[in-house]
Structures are given as structure tokens and as C-alpha cells.
Amino acid sequence: MAYRSGVNLQEVEPQAELYVPEPARIVKVEPQTAKEKLFEVELTSGRALGHGPGQFVQVFVPGIGEAPISLCSYRPGCSSFQLCVRNVGTVTAALHGLRPGALIGLRGPLGKGFAMDEIKGHDLLIVGGGIGLVPLRGVVQAILAERDQYGRVIILAGFKSPEEILFRSELEQWEQREDIEFAITIDRPHPGWGGHVGVITTLFPELRLDAPNTRALVVGPPIMYRFVITECRLKGLADESIILSLERRMRCGVGKCGHCQINNKYCCLDGPVFKYSELKFMWEAI
Amino acid sequence: MAKPTAAVFSFTGCEGCSLAILECEKELLDVVKLVDFVEWREAMSERTEAMIDLGFIDGAISTHHDEKKIRQVRERVRMLISIGACATNAGVNALKHRYGLREVKEIVYGEAGAEFDTISARPVHAVVPVEFEIPGCPIQGEEFLRIVLDIVQGKQPRLPNYPVCVECKRKENVCVFEKGMICMGPVARAGCGADCPSYGAWCEACRGFVDNPNDEAHEEVLTKYGVTSEELLQRYDIFCAYELEERKSRQQGQR
Amino acid sequence: MADRKLSIFVEEICRVEGHGNIVLNASNGKIEELWLEITESPRFFEAMMLGRRWDEATHISCRICGICSIAHTTTSVRAIEDAFGIEPSEQTLALRKIAYYGEMIQSHVLHFYYLAAPDFLGVPSVFPLVQSHPEEVKRALRLKRLGNDLCKAIVGRHIHPCAYLPKCMPKLPDPKALEDMHRRCVAAREDLAAAVDLFATVKLPDFQREGEALASWHPDEYGMYECQAIKSTQGDLTERRDYRQKIHEYVVPHSHAKHAETEQGAYMVGALARYRCNKEQLHPAALAVADRLQLDSYLFNPYAITLAQVVETVHSVEEAIRYLEWTLGRELEWEDWGVKPRAGRGVGVDEAPRGLLIHDYTFDDDGKLTAVNCIIPTNQNLNNIERDFHALVPQIIDRPDAEIQLLLEMLVRAYDPCISCATHLLRVEIKR
Amino acid sequence: MALLVMSEDYVRALIGKLMKETRVVAPHVREGRKQWQFADVVDPGRVALEYVSTILPPKKYAFPTEDDLVHWRTEEGFSAEPVLSVEPLVLFGVHPCDIYGLESLDISLTDTYVDPNWVARRRAMRIVGIDCLPDEWCFCSSMKTCSVSSGYDLFLTPINNWSEYVAEAATGAGAAMLAVAEGREASSHDLAQMRAWQNDKLARQRDRRINTEVNDLPLHFTGFADSVVWERWSRKCYSCGTCNTTCPTCFCFDVLDKLKLSLDEGYRSRVWDGCMLEDFAVVAPHENFREERHERLRHRFYRKYAYLYTRYGRPYCSGCGRCVRQCLADIDPVKVINDLLTEARKEAAGHGL
Ligand SMILES: Cc1cc2nc3c(=O)[nH]c(=O)nc-3n(C[C@H](O)[C@H](O)[C@H](O)COP(=O)(O)OP(=O)(O)OC[C@H]3O[C@@H](n4cnc5c(N)ncnc54)[C@H](O)[C@@H]3O)c2cc1C
Ligand code: SF4
Ligand code: SF4
Ligand code: SF4
């Protein structure tokens, strides 16, 4: 029989701390919008997290619970890191109630982030919808740290309304930069908004891309993926050049609990960052 | 944060649910460190005029007096939590709806019954808005404590949305269908630890239904075990009579 | 003070189960109105049960009362068994009794410690006692928990037991749990001794009123469970099924609870009634406690019901120990559940902690209920309480309102009325 | 390895000897019916050596229904530590399908990250396997789990109509058990009976087969996500998760926070979960990735026979039949898969293939 045989349990190394949150301190809290806050966090041990862009941590609020949150900063050498959290439920609400100095628990970094080595040397089309911009912010920071390693960098950001715009001052800086092509849109007209209006796909017709050399990094709500992927493919991007990050319910974050399974992938282990080519035959992915 | 105040108010019911709170003996001493009980007729003589943070209601609303009183209570309470099958679901009280109100009075009290105040039994949420509901007949002490903890911490409490079979199988029970009993477990909301099947009896869905019960499957299965649809409905009735009435009127409303 | 108008209205008497009011109107020392009003919403159990299958009957009727739901279940199951001609095995009876005494313990402890003791200690509820009498409170918790856990070990839980069915136990208890319960029952003797010490210091209000008392009777044991006949302090025995010949129920306008009487008029049921009827059959340990509390000198003082409960708790713990030992001494056997319904009438009579409880069912061929009558202890006591009121008030009418009110409330509480149980019961209203 | 033939009395005597040193768990009949449960042995005479299947698989000893993982405090800052209680254990009387189940969880729970609680408890476990006769729900012959060649210390095969057992040690621990056991040497006649036993097992399942080679299942599942089969079978599914709960190869869990009433300390513990339950794939806010019953049923089947098969190199189904034995709606994997295969053939015919 061709079944894989059992595991020699004497040879594996049990990870005693696998589910144990490590103490971390909230250093700073910055309100972003009505629903999002940006937390600056560091491990109390002083150890640097050592994460890559697109990875996440399991954040534990004592007594309340745990939730997966993307690491949204990428600043090698800096012992603290940032989490941008939208208040949607139990844990996120409790997080929003915390002040600088509060202690939380963290597990991670977890998951496969954006493979920066694979996208180096290419033009990048970065598309972020709403809270989807959160993991992408780390990517942009990584790119800017080594700007010369990449080709063109195009960033498209979409929000429902001006009130929901995240990382406002940073977006303004990106907009100012000569080495980034930046566009922002809001879904519906809004008093006082002079910029582009329309869903994010309405920014696509203007785009001129060198398709074979372009990698698209797309993060947003499920509905956005369907339309943005179609646009990317229309622009001639190959399926393996479209890179996405997905969200699922996660309890363990380490490929055991089964909640984040998307067809035969575990979102927490094999993702959250996937190539569209991996997902396109998965009816549960998008 | 100041210690929240709590009160228990009883309406039409057996008061088993208030007793279930008193029965958390081991924990009660810790609970009074978390919340201050300021009014609870069954257990204490004190009463209060002040606004109450947490009001637990047991019992259904089944008289005009009840109805008036619950409206007054609502005014005095920040967070209203119905506890037990009667308060959340009208409980067994709704069984009387199968007869006319006049008939039930007569059956029990004879002619003298005619002047008694009774109206259709309704859950609290049908009369005033409630913030949360803890089901069960009676409520489970553990669940009650968990929910009080959640509330004290500002956490949204949650009830399981899976059927009793889950807890029943975790306890490795022999399914009571195999003993010739009829079980509501497959459509009933869990959270009780499958108490009844674990002690060898059947589940009566005292916690109401899961969000999307598969009644059609249940009817089919029960037919397999020789139960008629009518008997099935009767079974549903014991604790879910009101829920079924509500569902029916919702469906009619949609049409 | 001759022209003092007295008007007391106690709305929703506290520390009783259910809703009731006391109404007292007196003018110039003459009582104009004095009654116990039951405002508990009527619940119509007897009607709701008609047409239901026999296997639903118990689960519905035990919802009459959450405080003594084991008693209701016991009586209901026995009515079903009576109707279907089922004789449960000795093992089943022994196991049921453990749960039954469990409830007696928990209910009595709840009453004498949580509900009555605050009166004697001069506080409004058990909560202040947590600070002032921590040891007593812990002892009360321990004893009450013992009662609960006895129920839990056998029938799953005390409020609306899960596993109490006609014919046999649907699940055998875990022998380890039984051993544990035995150990705890034995240890509880010490807590009880301390409770007895506390109640030995209590001074009861001075009041006596003679009257009939009814209780279950069993040839071989103190009548509680498995009643064979209803015994009266008048000396007569009434067959279980013939209870109607002795007890007459009627509706009174001021109350949702039916009242009851015998030919002698109002009568008393409950712990003191049982003591008066069957004292000789008590366990010697309980008799010794009765002596210590001088219960025999209070036979006609309703405030002494609380003391009788202390005595009965000792009895119940001893009985629980006896039946636990019986069960532990043998290998429990599986019995198959399978009840065959048949047409006929069945009557269950037992003692709820508050007194005589009767469930009377008639079934048709399909095992569906065609007639139901339930007689509940609190209902039976209501009449007696009102008689007590009328005897007591003239004796105390010159005292201050607050004292009158307290004495009346304490009197009602002493009967340990379970008003929700009375289904069909309480507020004190004093208008002078 | 040495073979020893033991009478039933000797087998029970061996249990008695093992009990002196270690906690021993074995199947026991439940409530006087044809249902069994792994439970602590109190009296070796009451162990059910001849049984069909326990309600819950023996994985519960390494992966309890509720298992505390983490203990945390906030008294002085925040601290957390792993929680693990392990105790040496002999699992006596495990059927081949359940051994297969335990080995499967060894694979998935050590893949990439190594689950500490599982591994510690599994290491502290000795397994005595025992062979069985399948009932009308078993389909181990289709799943090729009728016999296993590893995953046990000692294995007992009944011969001479359950009066004797051929004991075969596979490890040092197994050999040590044999060393204290009594019995006689095996003869070639005994070995022939062992083989006959295997054949008998296969023969009993002749009419209960999956109509394809199990190795081909991942392939057969490809492209049938939209098959009517899922909808058809899910119509009578309660979403009660009994199939997940009783499965020896399921390992999904939820994590609960249990807070002490003092508010400054608590546990995080895992409880069994199941992909058939309605809220299994719910994320914020109110999005359910498998909202429909048929989506959940499909996921379960794909996970067992395709996803995890490709991922971990073996099907995550041991053919023990528990899921259908306990399913009130009689949703039978054999029938569902055969139904899928039939539909596939019809479809292929429709395409003129
Ligand atoms: C890889 C990854 C990265 C992420 N990164 C971020 C990020 O950077 N920032 C961010 O804000 N969010 C992020 N999220 C999303 C975030 O994890 C979720 O919003 C978070 O888990 C919500 O947790 P909560 O406890 O606050 O909400 P919950 O209390 O879990 O509730 C959220 C919603 O889920 C539903 N729900 C959850 N559990 C149940 C249940 N058992 N039964 C019924 N309904 C249920 C509820 O309807 C509720 O509306 C990320 C998610 C993933 C997977
Ligand atoms: S006994 Fe009831 S709750 Fe338990 S598995 Fe069977 S049907 Fe489900
Ligand atoms: S098993 Fe059913 S009837 Fe029993 S407590 Fe649970 S929900 Fe209520
Ligand atoms: S397949 Fe059967 S056991 Fe599984 S969830 Fe559906 S009804 Fe329950």
C-alpha cells in the first residue's frame, strides 16, 4: 500500500510553547478612523519579532481571547512593530479598549507572507481595499527600504468614504513621492472629496502595464477580489503573477485546528498569502 | 469600573432559574465580589430605587400585571437579560395556547376561574427589548456564570449554535434513539452539556432550536422510529410552542 | 390607641418562592380584612397536560415548581406507575430515595439557613451574613450543595431532574460518585450538629393554635416517600387513591391558589405536620435533635416548622446514608426501559419538603392523559395560614406596625410556601 | 518476532499484571447494549475483547474532548505557561482501524508544527491491538486498514473462535509484555488460522465496498464540487457533527477561554469541533464560508478522501464506520462515494467519454 507510514514520535521535537502567548506591551495607540486603531507593540523580552511583510500574529487579550492580526509594519532593526485593528468583535473590541502600557500576549510571526525575493526586479501593482491595505503597508515599507530593487511601483487604494481612509499621512507621503505611482478612490461621491470616485476597479482603465513583468499584490474584502482579479487578467497578468492574502477564521494559527482550511490549503500555514494560480480551482477560495 | 449592580425579577414560572443562580454555591461568594445584588425577592428583603445595571428576568409574561411590571422593570434596568425557557421562549406556559384561555381557566378553577387575569404567555422579548437571553429549563449555572463574566468584562456573550448531539457524543452516550426514546437533540440548541441524554433520558429542546434546525430531516428520522408528525409537533410543543408560533407568523408575514 | 386604624399591605413577601401579598385591615382593634393574596400568575398545568403522552407528563408537571421538582417528579412518576401497574425494583426505589432525600436536605437547608435564619439573626437577607457569619454561610453552602449533589449523582440535577423516569433508572450512577456522596453525608453530620446548636438558641414567637395535620404514612418508615396512606392527627388513615374523601379543594376569590380543607376545616401539612403524625418513625439521631430543640413543646406553634425542618434534615441525611450503603453493598444491575401504557387511573402521593403532594392522572388506551388533578402542599397550607392570622393578629394588634408586619411575614415564611408551586399563590398588605 | 498463543484467561491475566504498574484502558460494554466505550479497567474480567467499535475512538486519551493548553495570569504583568498532564497509559484492545487513526493524527499533528500535548501523551502510551470482525457498517477492507503493520506494541489475533489469541510483539515494550504473559508457542496451524481470519474479514465486506481503488479517490473527487450528490445527501443532514465527533481521524478544534471569577487568571483550552457544524467557518462580520449544509458535507468528504490524502499521504478515514453507525440520517460514506462515482460515470457518458 502506498500510504505514508506513521511518524516516529521519538524523533519529533514537541513545541511546548506552541499555543502559549508571549507577553507583549502596547507602546502606543493611534486612532485611525472610527473603527480602526493603530497599535505599536513590543515583546516584553525585547526580542525583535523578525517577521516578513504579510505575516500575522495571534493576539491574545487576557480573559477575552485570541485573534489573528496582520503585521502592518516592516522596519528591520526596530524592536517594536505595528498592528492596525478594526473593531468588529470580541477581541478586537477589547484591544480597542487598551491603553499604552497594557500587556497582551502574542504568538508568531505566523504564516507565509509575501515572498519579496520572488517579486524583486519586477514592476509591482499594489491594490488594497479598505482594511486590506493593512498587510500591504508592510510590503510598501519593505519596498521603500530597498526601492532600487524593484521596477515601477503602482499603488491603488480604495475606501468606502473619506472617513475610512487609513494611514492618511503615510498615503500622502506616498502620493508625494516621485518613485511611486499612487491613486486613491472612494466608492461614492462625498461632500468635500475632490479626488477620484468609484470602486477600485474604476482606476484600472488608466493603467498601462508591462504585463509579463508585473506582479500584482491584492488584498481586500472577498467581493473585491473577484473584480480586481478579472481586471488584472484583462491587463494580461498571468495567474501566478497575481498575489493575494486571504482571511479565514483561525483558532490555532499553526495548521491544526482546521478552521482556516480553504480546499486543501490551510490559510495559516500555506498562506495567508497565495498566488491566484494556486487558488483558481478552489471553489472555496474567492 | 464601579461594581455593577444586579437584580433578579420573577414573572410567571417555577422560579427554578433563580434557584439555579442560588445553586452556584461555590462560586456565589466570588460572584458577589463582581456584582452587587440589590434586589431579589426570592432571596432577600432589600429593594432599591436606583438604576440597576444588570436585570435578570425569569418567568414568562402571562398576565396584564406581568406586562405592566416588566415595562416598569425595563425602565429601571440598563441591561435586561432573560433567563430560562419561560423568559426566553415562554416555556411550558405557552402550552395553554392550545386550548382557549377561557377553557384552561375552567378546567383548573371551574367557574370561579373566569375572572382570573391571564393572557397568552409570551417571552420577555415579545414585550420589551432585551439585551441577552440565557435559555434552558432550568438555566445552567456554569453558563450563567460565564455569561455574567463576559458581561462584566464588556464581552459580547455567545450561545452555542450547534445541536445537543455534539455534547452528547462528546460524553460518549449511547444515543437514546437506540433505547426506543425520542430525542430532540439533533435540532435543539446545545450548551446544557447534553444533561438529559447523559443521564439516560431524552432531550426535550428546553433551550429552543439551533438557528437552522433541519426539521425535515427530523421528521424523516422520527418516522423511521415510528413517530407520527403529530406526535413530533407535540414534542416540539413542550418548550418550543411559542417559537413555533413565532416562526409560523414570520413565514406568513413573508408570504 | 383605641381608635388606631391599622392597614398593612405587604406586597410580594420576600424570601418565599413565588408571589404573594398579605392584606390586613383593622379598625379599633377589630379585624376587617385579613388574608393572604396569591398574585402568582395562574399557570393552568392541569389543563396543559390534557391530551399529552404519558412520557411527557412528568416533564411538564415538574415545571410546576423548580424548588421541589424532585418531589413533583417523584409523585408524577408514581402516578404513572400506579396507572400502568409498574412495580419498580428495590434497586430503583433505593436510588430514587437517595435523590429524594437529597432534595429534602437541599430544600430544608435553603429554607432554614437562607430564608428563615436572617429573621432570627435580624438581617434582611443571607447576603449580609456572608460578612457577619462567614462560617455559618459556608456551612449552609456545604449542606445545600450536599443535597444538590445527591440529586445530581442519581438523576442528573436537582432542578427538573433529567433522568427520573417510570419503571427504572435510565442510567446507573457511577459507583465512585456514590462512594464520594457517602463520605460527604457522613461528614455532614458535623455541620448539622453546628446547625442544631445555632437553632437551639433561637427564640420562637410565642403563639399556639391547635388544628389538624396531615402527612403521608408508610408502615416501615417515616412517611415521606412511597406513601401508603394519608395519616391525620385525628387518628384516621385514608387510602392513597381515596384522597378526595379526606381533602376538599375550593377556589377563593382573593387568591390564584386553590384552598383546601377536611371535614375539620383547615389543616396543616409540611415538616411539623409530618413530625406530629409520624414522630416515632424518625431516625434516633433526628429524635435526639427534636429533644434538644424541645420540639414537642411547640407542636402547635407554626413558627416551629423551621425547627422541624432541622430535625428532618438530620433524618434525611441518615436515610441517605442508609440507602447509599445499601447500593454500595451490591453490584447495580441494568434494567431495560420499556413502559407499556394502558388505560386507567393512577395516583401518586408523597411528601414534598413543604408537605403532602398528590398527582392524580387518568390515561386512555394510547397512554394520553384524559384527566389530571394535582394537589400542592402550599395550597393546602393557605387556609391554615389564614386561620393562624386570625388567631395571631388579635394577640399582637397593639404592637407597632413594623412588628406586626414582621410577625406575619415570618409566619408565612415559616410555612416555607412555594408559591410558584401553588401554581394557582403571595403579598402582606396591612391596612388598619 | 516471537509469537505466543494465549488463552482468553491469560489475556485477562496479562491485563491484570499491566494494571499493577500502569493505568490500563480498554473497551467495555456500555449500558448493557451492543455499544462499547474505552474506559479504565477496574476488573479485567469485564473488558470486552470481542467488540465491534467504541462510540468514541481512543484518540480521546491523547486529545481529550476538552484539553487545557495554556494557563495565564495577570497578577504581576502578564505571564502564560503551557499546561500538560501526562500519565503512562496502556491502551488495551485497539482495533487496526483505530491504530490507523492514531497514526494519522501523529502525522497531521506533527506536520510543520509539533503539537506538544498530543506527542507527550502518545509517547507515554503503549498500545495493545486486537483484531476484530467487522459489522454491517465497517468498510476497512475498502480503506485498506483491515490490518496494520505498525502503531502497536503488541497485537492479538483471535483464533479458535475467540478462545485463544496469537500475540505478536512489535516493539521492546511489546516484548516486555510478552515476557510476563503466559501462553504456548504458536504452531503453523495457528498461523494458518490467523491468515484465515484476515480472509474472513475481507469476505465479510464483499458487499460493502467503495467501487474504486481508494488510491484513486483524490482523482475521482477532482471536478465534482458541483455534483448533485452533495445536495442530495445533505438534505437530510442535521449538521449535528456526530460524524466528526466520533471519527478517529478528525482533529479539528475550537479554543475556549476559561476565566476564573477572580478575573486575573484563566485557561485556554481546546474542545473538539467539527466542520459539519454551522458556525465552523464563520468569520467577522457574519461571513460564513460554508453556509450551506451541502458545502459542509462536501468539505468533510473532500477533506477525508482528497485534501488531507494529498497533503499527508493517506486518506483521513479508517473505514471504522463510526460516522454512519451513529448518524441518525444514515449518511453513509460508502454510499455517498459510490453515488459520486456513479454520477461521475453518468456525466462522463454524457460527454461521450
Ligand atoms: C491572517 C489574518 C490577518 C488578519 N489581519 C487583520 C488585521 O490586521 N486587522 C484587523 O482588524 N483584522 C485582521 N484580521 C481579521 C481579524 O482576525 C478578525 O476580524 C478577528 O478575528 C475578529 O475577532 P474578534 O474576536 O474581535 O471578533 P469575533 O468576536 O470573533 O466576531 C467577529 C464576527 O465573527 C462572527 N463570529 C465569530 N465567531 C463566531 C462564532 N463562534 N459564532 C458565530 N459567529 C461568530 C461574529 O458574527 C462577529 O460578527 C485578520 C484575519 C486573518 C485570518
Ligand atoms: S441521544 Fe439525542 S442528543 Fe444524543 S446523539 Fe442521540 S439524538 Fe443526539
Ligand atoms: S438535553 Fe435537552 S431538555 Fe435536557 S437540558 Fe439539554 S436542551 Fe434541555
Ligand atoms: S452526516 Fe449525519 S452525523 Fe454528520 S452532521 Fe450530518 S446528520 Fe450529523
Image (spheres, coloured by chain):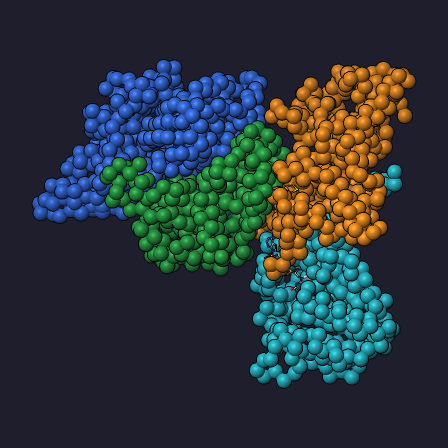
Tell me if residue C180 comes above or below residue A147 in the rendering. above
Q: Residue sitting at 51 percent across and 41 percent down?
A: B205
Q: Quadrant of residue A213?
A: bottom right
Nearest to the observer: residue A79 or residue C59: C59
Which residue is found at the position 57% from the left and 24% from the top? C175
Q: Where is residue D44, by image quadrant?
A: top right
Query: A225 or A131: nearer the eye?
Result: A225
User: In the drawing, does residue B143 fall left or right of residue B76?
Assistant: right
Give the quarter the ligand 1 occupies: bottom right
Q: Chain A's colour?
A: cyan
Image spot of residue A175 (x, y percent) = 72, 81
User: Foreground residue, C366 or C23?
Assistant: C366
Asked if residue A252 is positioned above or below residue D184 in the image, the reply reads below
Q: Quadrant of residue D52?
A: top right
- Chain the render paints green: B
Q: Residue at x 35, y 30 (%)?
A: C371
**What residue is drawn where x is 62% and y is 68%?**
A37
Q: Count the marks: how many?
A: 0
User: Is residue D352 visible in this depiction of the protein?
Assistant: yes
Please state the horizontal and vertical placement of residue C41, each as a whole percent of the image: 32, 44
User: Could you say where residue A68 lies in the image, as x and y percent from the top left?
Assistant: 68, 58
Does the image show residue D125? Answer: no
Chain C, hue in figure? blue
The chain painted orange is D
Residue D325 location (% of width, % of height): 67, 34
